[in-house]
Structures are given as structure tokens and as C-alpha cells.
Image (tube, grey):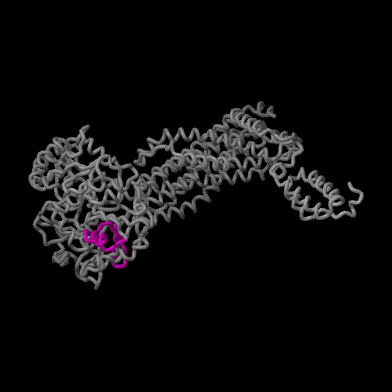
């Protein structure tokens, strides 16, 4: 060093501090020493200013990754490729050496990831509904919020007059398409007859909803009123391998329609379902009421409307204009009580529940619930990995100590353990992919979908990679940090103790794991109980052996003869007709006046037109009064009990009401029947008798006939009286059971996922019990020598797990009770969450726990104490 250094100005301290912060610690002294030496020489030779400038330049030269990122290590630079290879080799050896432990981890993670993947694919499918349509963001369905004495009811039915109002009065509306309610019609080509669902739809429909056309142009295929567009499968059914374009289809045995287009079959994620399209202009040309509806009132709500807004226009911009569009008409119930709203196409599938006129939920609630379940199941599987790895940490303590003693740093050990976690998770992922592939057919059958694994989609692999990384980090982080924290001195001296403090986090995780499993089991039981509660509810009519067939013109002409022959031949014991099937109400209306009506009071009630013998046929009973005396008893009306209660009528029989300007006398009161949702109260309903043919034929199979025999004989009869149509029927009990479809699906899925969650949890318990039995082998040997029985040893090893599951039960039950109580609130008719559900679940959880750990406990108890005491 320069002898005059003490008199020479020192380098700028700020520069040194910057370098100290910038340069890696092990290079710091050498770099600063060199810089200072050159600085002192330059001050003597070149002067202070130039020395400082050069010092600054040299300091900047050190701002390179080689000086910044190199870590302070006294050892030579490692070969990362060799190191990674070494880590993988060790990880593979650990996997194969500890087969039982590896099996439990891989099995748990595989099942957990398979559940999450199935739920993820299902959720993606549900969210994808209708989004395959170009421009779906601008498509809406028109709905009405109807004010019924302060209660807002939301309907999808609208008037044709509203279609024209939207088309011509709202400039932001680009296109409007009218539609019927997409029911079944008869199609006939030669001898081939089918009776399938289709739609009579406005001319702009295929330009708004751009379903792929195989033949024809969207702007032209529905121009001719006597044309028809078939889906690919319908065309194949009717025409086989022939080209159907330009050929004729007999429609409802009334008109010949020319095939002008072929649509690709609709994907399963389409909200609208139809097998053919007929122009709405045909509907108007052939049905006088429809033709009249165009120029009628806004209150003629018998149609559906779809709207496409212009590009760049949001619903919020036109909502105010559309809301009161009907209010120009006087003396119309719509104008007085209705507000028009639009529901976006992208919400149709997920949001079907309205409250106070706003979307509040629907299928989206179940999607959210199962998203949480998927995450919970993966977490439960990760907890297994964490618990088993930390429990067996003593086995790897010596390895950690030796590695640290020969120079491994903590970060390298963390990397090693994380790589092991990634390897194990990757193996589990491969098995989970195989599981999902095998389970998808059954899952699709259960959910009525056609979900496939999108192997060719980049997004799928990106999502899989992201989930794989997150799962591996969740499973491997805690063990990696825990194992790498061991002190090598203590480990190698054998003084390291893994005591109660170390096992506490493991116990917490077991409690968390079982809390989730118990909550899922409780949920599955309550959902099942709610479904059974509704299924066991008295329907108010008899759905057994009751069939319905939709009427058509030909059947209407021959219905009297058909009814007579059905009864005369003994095939049916009762036959009648109505405007709605037994399990639904297709028409709602408002009553003009009734005794005691308050000024301005309105009541929206179901209206069912019926023929003679309707109540006998469907099995409804009258609480008071009489049945309709004949088909011509058109001045009488029968209400159900809900309607009488709603009207506040005392002694209702014989009183006069007015409906659509007609005075009607109350002849009787029918007991309430669950014709719509089995989870809600019975709708107020009015029954009117009419002699004209109605929409639905109802008939009950005679008890002496088997269903198969009756169907064979009825097919012949219907073919005789309705030769132009294929015989089509619906069983009322199946239609009623379909009302539980969603809840049944949710119950089944909740039960399956709860079962898998408890299975994964038990895998973890089994592994922990195995480890504990192994660790306490010598203690068990000593106890047996001192006289402990097998029961004593079993109790010793089992009580801790029972204790943990008991704590999990205490945590899970209030949380589950709160969530399930909220879920049940959405049902008007709901079950109670009884105490026995919790007792049953708690006992079940304890029983499963004991069953899981008993194998290892008894195995340890049966071990020869001599051999146990020899184990080091």
C-alpha cells in the first residue's frame, strides 16, 4: 500500500457502499481492495478528479451478473446438469426404496388430481355454453318482470307486438327473431315418421345465431314460409344417404315443406335444442291466432323473442328505452305491470333464477360449490404428502446432515426436496390423466355431457402445467423447508430430537384434512335428504301409469273415437284432455275480479283448460264442491286450495268471479297438486272446462295390463287413429322425476367426491399409522413383555387419531351447518338438518378412522416382543 495513503483522499464512501451492496459477498473484499489500490496510485499520478472518475467507471464495470449473482461459496462452481441428474437419481431411488410410502403419496395425489381435473373439465364445459357462436356477446333473450302485488315475477313469454316494437322503435337493436316454445312436431317422408322437437323461428334467427350450415345460406334458408332446415342427424333419419336439399318433408301432416338447408348437429353446450327449423312466417300463415297476435295486444304473451344489439352497443345503453316500451298501450296488463328486460346469451345456462327481477343464481351456484370441492380434494391429497414426508423426516435426517457437512447449502437441499416433490407429482399426474380418461365415459353418462380431454389444446396443457406446479409446491414446500433446516452437528451427533413440537403442524393438517372430509360427507347427506324429502312429498295426484301424448290436428279429429276405444278395449281406465301435461302448467293469467278484491290488486295464477273426467284421470281430489258436470260445463270454474287461500275467500263454492270478461261460478275446490316445482308451494291454479280438443291427451293404463303389453296395444290404436304421426308418449312419473334431475346430479357428485375425499384422507391416516407403529416397535415390545394385551396396544396407537378426528368433527359441524342452512333457504319446501345427521357422520368418521389404523395397530400388537426388542 502507498506509504502516503493516510494523507491521500479516500475513495468516495457512497461508491463503496454501492459496491458493497452490488457485489457478491465472497468477491467484495478482493474487488474493493483492487479498486482502492488503483485509486490511490491514480490520485498520486493523475490527480483526484481523474482518479475519482476512473474509480466510478471501474465500479460500473462490476455491475455484471458474474459479480452480482454469484453466490458466496468457497467451493468451485457446481455443474448444475450433473447436480440435477443427481437429484433426480436420488428422488427415483427414494421412490422405489420406500414403495409403500410412495404408493400412498402417488395414489392420494392421483385421485385428488383426477377429481380436480374432472371438475375442471366439467366447469369449463359449463362455462363454454353458447360461446361457440360468433358474436354471442350481442345476443339476448327478451324477458318480462311482472309486478304481482309487489312481488316481481320474471317470464320468458312475450308478445309478437313487442317484436315489432323492438325492431322498429329501438335503433340500437340490429335484429329480432320471434320463436314459438320449441315443442315437438311430426315430420314425415314417405313411410318414415318421426316426432321430435323443433322451432318455428323468425327469418333473422340463423344470422343472429350462426350455427354452422352444411348446406344453404343463413340469409336465405328461412325466406320461404314453406321451407324447412334440418339438422344433419334429422336429415339422415328421414332421407338416409340421399341428398335432402330440395326434397319435401310433410310437416304435421298439414303442409309440404321444402328442405332449404342442413345444419350441423348442435353441440352439447348449446342452450337451444332443436332438430329442425321452420320459418315463423309459416306459423303465422297457418295458425290464425298467431297471425292475429302480430297486431294484437302486448298482453298476448305466447311467444319467445331473441334480440341482437348492434356492435359496440351494450345492454346498459338501451335498458331504459326497452324497459317501458310496452307502456304506450292502455288497458293492457303488460302496460300496467310489466317491465321488459334482456338476458345475455352467455348467462342463459348458468343463471336461471331471478329474484326481484334480477339474476341471482342458478347452475352457477353449483359450479362455484364444486370448484371449492375440487380445490379441497387436492389440498387433502397434498396434506398426505406433507404429513408423511415430515413424519418420516428422521429417516432422512442423517442424509441432510452429511450433505450439509460436505458443503451443501440449504438452498440446494430445498431444491433437491422440491425436485423430489415435482417428480412424485408428475408421476401422480400421469396416473390421474389415465384415471380421468377411464372415468370420463361414466362421468359423461352421469352429467349427460360429451366432455373429452382436449389433448390438442395449448390452453389445456398450460392449465395442467400451472396446476402441476402449484400442486408440487403445495405438497413439497413445507417438507423441503423443514428437512433442510436440520442442524448437521445435532444430526451427526445423534442429539436431534423430533418431539411434540415437530408433530404439532402434522396434527393440525390431519385435523384440517378430516374437517374438509367430514363437511363434504355432511353436505352429501343433507343434499340426499333434501331430495328424498321432496320426492316423498304428496303430489296431490297419481303419476303412476299415467301417460300423456301431445295432440295434433289429425288426433284432434279422431280423439273421441280413440278415447272410446281405449276405454272399451280395457287398455285405459280413464282418458281426458288438458291444455298442460299433468306435471306442468303452460299458461298463466291474471283474474279480473273476485269477491273481496282490493283496488289495484293482481294475482298471477296458472290456468288449465280441461275436458270432462280430468280430475278422475290424473287422480286429483276435490276438497269441496263438485267436479265439472260435462264437457259443456263452461260457465263453472274450479280453483285449487292455494288460489282460494290467495283470494281470501270464505265458503268459495257458488261465488262468482270474472276472468277475461267472462263471469264464472266456482263449482269446487281441488286439493293442491304439485304440478310445477316439488320444492315450492303449489301455484294458485284455475281449472276451466271446454269441449274443444286441447293440447294434451291424458290416459291411465288399466291395472290388469302390464306396461309393455299396454304400450304395444296403444301403439296399434294410435297408429289407427293418428296414422300420419309416430306414436309418442311421456310417462308422468318420469316427467315428475325429471324435476329432481339437477338436485339428484348434485347429490350424486357430492357423494362421490365426499367418498373420494375420505378415501384420500384415510390413505394419509394409514401411512401415519404405519409410521407410528414402526417408530414405536420397541416400546410396544416392552409393553407386551410387561403384560400389555393386543387391545391395550391397539388403543395406544389408535387413540391419537380418534382424538384428532374428534377435533375435526367439532370444527366441521358448525361450518357445515351454517353453509347447508343457507343452501336450504332457497327451497320453500325443505328438510331439516337433524341432529342424527351429525351423530351418524361423527360415528362414521370415527369408525372409518379406526378401521384404517387398526390394521397397522393390530399388526404391531401381534409382533413377537423378542423381535421388537432386538430392533435398533
Frontmost residue, 410 versus 865: 410
Residue 642 seen from this side = no
The quadrant of the image that shows the C terminus is top right
Residue 608 seen from this side = yes
Frontmost residue, 753 versus 412: 412
Residue span colored magenta: 142-171
Q: Position of residue 746 (x, y in %)?
A: 39, 46
* Relative vertical location of residue 610 with respect to residue 398 in this rendering, above or below: below
* Residue 477 occupies quadrant: top right
Q: Position of residue 689 (x, y in %)?
A: 13, 57
Frontmost residue, 519 versus 625: 519
* Residue 704 occupies quadrant: top left
Residue sitting farthest toward the front:
46
Relative placement, left or right, of 790 versus 730 is right
Query: Residue at point 44% right, 39% down?
Result: 457
Q: Position of residue 561 (x, y in %)?
A: 7, 45
Relative placement, left or right, of 290 versus 740 is left
* Relative vertical location of residue 367 with respect to residue 711 in this rendering, above or below: below
Residue sitting farthest toward the right:
3
Amino acid at each position: 500500500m502507498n506509504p502516503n495513503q493516510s494523507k491521500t483522499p479516500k475513495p468516495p464512501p457512497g461508491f463503496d457502499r454501492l459496491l458493497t451492496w452490488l457485489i457478491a459477498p465472497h468477491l467484495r473484499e478482493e474487488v474493493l481492495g483492487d479498486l482502492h489500490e488503483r485509486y490511490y496510485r491514480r490520485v498520486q499520478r493523475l490527480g483526484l478528479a481523474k482518479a475519482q472518475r476512473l474509480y466510478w467507471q471501474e465500479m460500473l464495470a462490476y455491475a455484471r451478473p458474474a459479480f452480482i449473482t454469484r453466490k458466496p461459496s468457497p467451493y468451485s462452481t457446481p455443474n448444475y446438469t450433473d447436480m440435477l441428474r443427481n437429484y433426480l437419481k436420488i428422488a427415483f431411488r427414494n421412490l422405489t426404496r420406500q414403495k409403500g410410502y410412495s404408493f400412498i403419496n402417488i395414489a392420494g395425489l392421483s385421485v385428488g388430481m383426477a377429481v380436480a381435473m374432472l371438475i375442471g373439465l366439467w366447469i369449463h364445459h359449463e362455462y363454454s355454453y353458447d360461446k361457440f357462436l360468433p358474436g354471442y356477446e350481442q345476443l339476448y333473450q327478451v324477458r318480462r318482470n311482472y309486478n304481482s302485488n309487489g312481488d316481481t315475477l320474471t317470464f320468458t313469454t312475450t308478445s309478437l307486438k313487442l317484436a315489432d316494437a323492438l325492431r322498429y322503435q329501438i335503433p340500437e337493436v340490429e335484429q329480432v327473431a320471434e320463436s314459438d316454445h320449441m315443442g315437438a312436431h311430426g315430420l314425415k317422408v314417405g313411410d318414415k315418421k318421426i316426432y321430435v322437437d323443433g322451432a318455428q323461428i323468425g327469418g333473422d334467427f340463423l344470422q343472429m345465431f350462426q350455427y354452422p350450415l352444411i348446406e344453404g345460406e343463413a340469409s336465405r334458408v328461412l325466406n320461404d314460409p314453406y321451407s324447412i332446415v334440418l339438422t344433419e342427424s334429422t336429415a339422415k333419419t328421414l332421407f338416409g344417404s340421399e341428398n335432402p336439399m330440395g326434397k319435401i318433408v310433410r310437416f304435421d301432416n298439414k303442409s309440404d315443406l321444402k328442405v332449404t338447408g342442413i345444419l350441423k348437429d348442435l353441440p352439447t353446450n348449446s342452450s337451444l335444442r332443436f332438430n329442425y327449423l321452420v320459418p315463423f312466417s309459416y306459423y303465422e300463415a297457418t295458425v290464425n291466432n298467431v297471425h292475429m297476435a302480430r297486431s294484437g295486444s302486448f298482453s298476448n304473451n305466447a311467444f319467445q323473442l331473441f334480440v341482437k344489439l348492434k356492435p359496440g352497443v351494450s345492454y346498459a345503453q338501451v335498458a331504459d328505452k326497452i324497459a317501458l316500451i310496452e307502456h304506450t298501450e292502455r288497458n293492457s296488463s303488460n302496460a300496467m305491470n310489466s317491465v321488459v328486460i334482456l338476458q345475455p346469451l352467455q348467462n342463459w345456462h348458468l343463471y336461471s333464477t331471478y329474484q326481484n327481477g334480477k339474476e341471482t343464481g342458478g347452475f352457477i351456484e353449483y359450479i362455484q360449490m364444486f370448484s371449492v370441492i375440487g380445490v379441497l380434494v387436492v389440498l387433502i391429497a397434498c396434506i398426505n404428502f406433507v404429513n408423511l414426508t415430515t413424519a418420516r423426516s428422521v429417516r432422512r435426517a442423517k442424509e441432510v446432515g452429511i450433505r450439509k457437512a460436505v458443503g451443501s447449502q440449504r438452498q440446494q437441499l430445498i431444491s433437491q426436496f422440491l425436485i423430489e416433490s415435482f417428480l412424485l407429482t408428475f408421476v401422480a399426474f400421469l396416473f390421474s390423466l389415465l384415471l380421468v380418461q377411464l372415468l370420463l365415459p361414466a362421468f359423461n353418462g352421469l352429467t349427460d355431457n360429451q366432455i373429452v380431454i382436449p389433448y390438442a389444446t395449448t390452453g389445456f396443457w398450460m392449465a395442467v402445467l400451472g396446476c402441476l406446479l402449484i400442486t408440487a409446491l403445495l405438497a413439497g414446500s413445507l417438507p423441503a423447508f423443514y428437512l433442510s433446516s436440520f442442524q448437521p452437528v445435532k444430526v451427526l451427533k445423534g442429539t436431534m430430537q423430533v418431539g411434540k413440537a415437530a408433530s404439532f403442524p402434522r396434527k393440525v393438517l390431519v385435523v384440517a384434512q378430516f374437517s374438509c372430509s367430514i363437511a363434504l360427507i355432511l353436505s352429501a347427506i343433507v343434499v340426499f335428504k333434501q331430495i328424498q324429502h321432496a320426492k316423498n312429498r304428496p303430489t296431490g295426484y297419481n303419476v303412476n301409469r299415467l301417460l300423456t301424448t301431445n295432440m295434433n290436428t289429425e288426433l284432434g279429429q279422431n280423439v273421441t273415437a280413440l278415447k272410446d276405444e281405449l276405454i272399451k278395449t280395457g287398455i285405459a281406465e280413464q282418458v281426458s284432455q288438458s291444455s298442460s301435461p299433468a306435471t306442468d302448467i303452460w299458461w298463466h293469467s291474471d283474474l279480473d275480479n273476485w269477491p273481496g278484491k282490493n283496488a289495484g290488486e293482481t294475482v298471477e295464477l296458472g290456468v288449465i283448460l280441461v275436458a270432462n273426467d280430468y280430475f278422475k284421470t290424473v287422480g286429483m281430489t276435490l276438497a269441496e264442491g263438485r267436479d265439472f258436470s260435462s264437457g259443456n260445463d263452461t260457465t263453472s270454474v274450479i280453483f285449487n286450495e292455494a288460489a282460494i287461500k290467495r283470494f281470501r275467500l270464505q265458503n268459495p263454492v257458488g261465488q262468482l268471479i270474472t276472468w277475461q270478461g267472462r263471469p264464472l261460478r266456482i263449482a269446487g275446490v281441488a286439493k293442491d297438486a304439485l304440478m310445477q316445482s316439488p320444492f315450492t308451494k303449489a301455484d294458485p291454479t284455475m281449472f276451466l272446462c271446454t269441449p274443444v280438443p286441447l293440447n294434451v291427451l291424458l290416459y291411465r293404463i288399466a291395472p290388469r295390463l302390464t306396461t309393455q303389453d299396454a304400450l304395444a296395444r296403444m301403439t296399434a290404436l294410435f297408429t289407427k287413429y293418428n296414422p300420419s304421426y309416430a306414436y309418442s308418449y311421456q310417462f308422468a312419473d318420469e316427467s315428475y322425476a325429471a324435476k329432481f334431475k339437477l338436485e339428484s346430479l348434485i347429490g350424486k357428485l357430492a357423494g362421490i367426491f365426499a367418498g373420494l375425499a375420505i378415501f384420500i384422507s384415510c390413505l394419509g391416516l394409514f401411512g401415519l399409522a404405519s409410521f407410528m407403529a414402526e417408530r414405536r416397535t420397541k416400546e410396544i415390545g416392552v409393553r407386551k413383555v410387561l403384560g400389555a394385551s393386543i387391545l391395550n396396544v391397539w388403543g395406544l396407537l389408535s387413540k391419537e387419531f380418534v382424538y384428532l378426528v374428534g377435533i375435526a368433527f367439532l370444527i366441521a359441524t358448525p361450518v357445515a351447518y351454517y353453509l347447508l342452512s343457507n343452501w336450504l333457504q332457497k327451497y320453500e319446501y325443505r328438510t331439516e338438518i337433524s341432529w342424527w345427521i351429525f351423530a351418524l357422520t361423527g360415528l362414521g368418521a370415527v369408525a372409518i378412522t379406526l378401521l384404517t389404523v387398526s390394521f397397522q395397530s393390530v399388526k404391531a400388537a401381534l409382533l413377537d416382543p423378542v423381535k421388537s426388542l432386538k430392533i435398533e
